[in-house]
Amino acid sequence: MRDGDIIMSKEKIGRIYRIAGPVVTATGISARMYDLVKVGNEKLMGEVIQIQGEKTTIQVYEDTSGLKPGEVVENTGEPLSVLLGPGLLDSIYDGIQRPLPVLTKQMGEYIKRGVEAPGLNLEKKWEFKPSVNKGESVKPGTIIGEVEEMPGLIHKIILPPLPEYTGKVAEIKAGKFNVEEPIGKLDNGAELKLSQKWPVRTPRKFTNKLQAEVPFITGQRIFDALFPLAKGGMAAIPGGFGTGKTVAQQTLAKWSDADIIVYIGCGERGNEMTEVLKEFPELKDPRTGRPLMNRTVLIANTSNMPVAAREASVYTGMTIAEYYRDMGYNVALMADSTSRWAEAMREISSRLEEMPGEEGYPAYLATRLAEFYERAGRVNTLSKEIGSITVIGAVSPPGGDFSEPVTQNTLRVIKTFWALDPRLAQRRHFPAINWLTSYSLYKDTLENWFVDNVGARWVEMVNELMAYLQEEEKLLEIVQLVGSDALPAKQQLTLEIARMIREFFLQQNAFHEVDTYCQMDKMYMLMETILHYANQANLALDQGAGIQSLINMESKETIANIKFIKDYKKELAKIKLDMDREFDKFR
């Protein structure tokens, strides 16, 4: 053997002993939990998930058909990590951060096994502007400079949150660099680059978590008004097939006031993910007028892809979200759907012959879900910025049964619950969110923000709307028995006001150019106008007006058109005047 030849330690090389679907058992390999390994002659990527004496169990992130016992298994000695740096935005990855467009160019529509591609473009040069000087003291998390990743979007170069990045800047350079070239170094010899690697299962560090007191604005009336979500909050959208989970998540991704969107298609149908991949690049960001993809990272892991990669996709997405949070950005992470991830855990667990929990899910299901959702939050970062990750997870309970384990364990963790109702979807009421079973635990902490930034009567009006909707539910039971005409006039009016709230306010068309997004001012004025009618109608009823005359008022029906009008302020003012004229006739 010549000098300089690399000798691979025998402990890093093993052999396949047993294969059970995506789970492979190897012998003769010395590994730690969650080490990344390359399996078989094609070097399929896998991760160590169990160690029993001489046997090491690996979950393989690619199709294992054709593997046979005796093939080589090689331990890399590193955990599954993602490459972080300029170039993440406008990217489409699979669950283990392989860029799908790059793989498509290499081998066409069907991706072969064992293929590797770096998560970032290693050749592209970025214009780096340092923000620290030679001799300056730095520590983990310090922002040392910036790169314009997309027009108008600055990518801050942060020192990795590791102890070796404490010291003084010995050298720092401005200019054009790729993500692998050194841009400087510290006095302890630590090299500075535009990129860094981070293990996906390890949460990135921050200074402290902040109170959830700033709302996550979605532009969807039922979310923002009745069940608001805070920046850094956790929400779940559970619903059966066809209730609109994916459309709701895509709408939130398009219109929410997040700076960065990370969209994880975890085990969803290929045609749904295709819609996202085709639609997002063509959409314009309402805030900047530029393509929405400029601030989006898509992770596509469809239902026909290897099951083990679903788990990796969730952690990959969360790590990318934490990286942008550390720069001081507000990140929205959409996971569609966590049920498919849980199903992948169940399949792997059964292959490992672990003791099953409820409905066959592993006993650690609740822990894994909690670990994922708890990585959300609005925080003070190590670089003294304020950043947030807001997590919105879709849940797909079989048959729409909310009592199943994934939904129930998610409910223990999240604080905003947007429950989709198949009956509303059948009636073409979208978003099909059930206003009686949904809730938000952020309402109290967000009250002051809405009062200070939108309107003094916001909280009062929201409570009035909910009171009418709850009263309607009680009355509908009576209506089913005796009909609405048998009700007293006061209760008939309550039913009419509740109908207006449902149809004029809560119903929203995600595909209409104007109605797809509703400004906070517009929401406030719509609520005000509906409740103005409610108050005046109740007053008129007390003064002897006929219930049918009040229900048949022309002016109130024109409120329905406001959703589709851009110049809504003039129209609402006119409707109020017309309404008052009609009420004057009853006095």
Image (cartoon, rainbow, N blue to C red):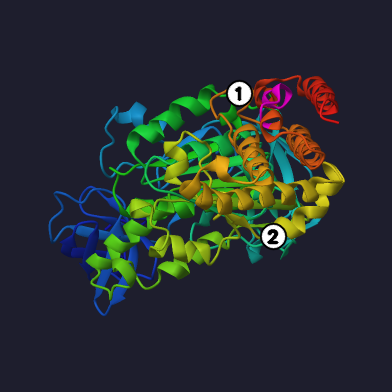
Q: Position of residue 343 (x, y in %)?
A: 33, 57
* Gap between marks 2 and 1 measured at Cα: 36 Å
Query: Quarter of the image holding residue 415?
Result: bottom right
- Decide if residue 213 is in sight here: no
The residue indicated by pointer 2 is: 140
Mark 2: amino acid? Pro
Quadrant holding the C terminus:
top right
The residue indicated by pointer 1 is: 284
State the predominant SS element of the stretch in magenta: helix
Q: Position of residue 335 (x, y in %)?
A: 48, 48
Residue numbers of the magenta segment = 551-557
Q: Position of residue 403 (x, y in %)?
A: 41, 63
- Indicate which label's residue lies in the foreground, 2 or 1: 1
Residue at horizontal 53 percent and vertical 22 percent from the top: 282
Secondary-structure class at tag 1: loop
Q: Position of residue 159 (x, y in %)?
A: 67, 53
Quadrant holding the N terminus:
bottom left
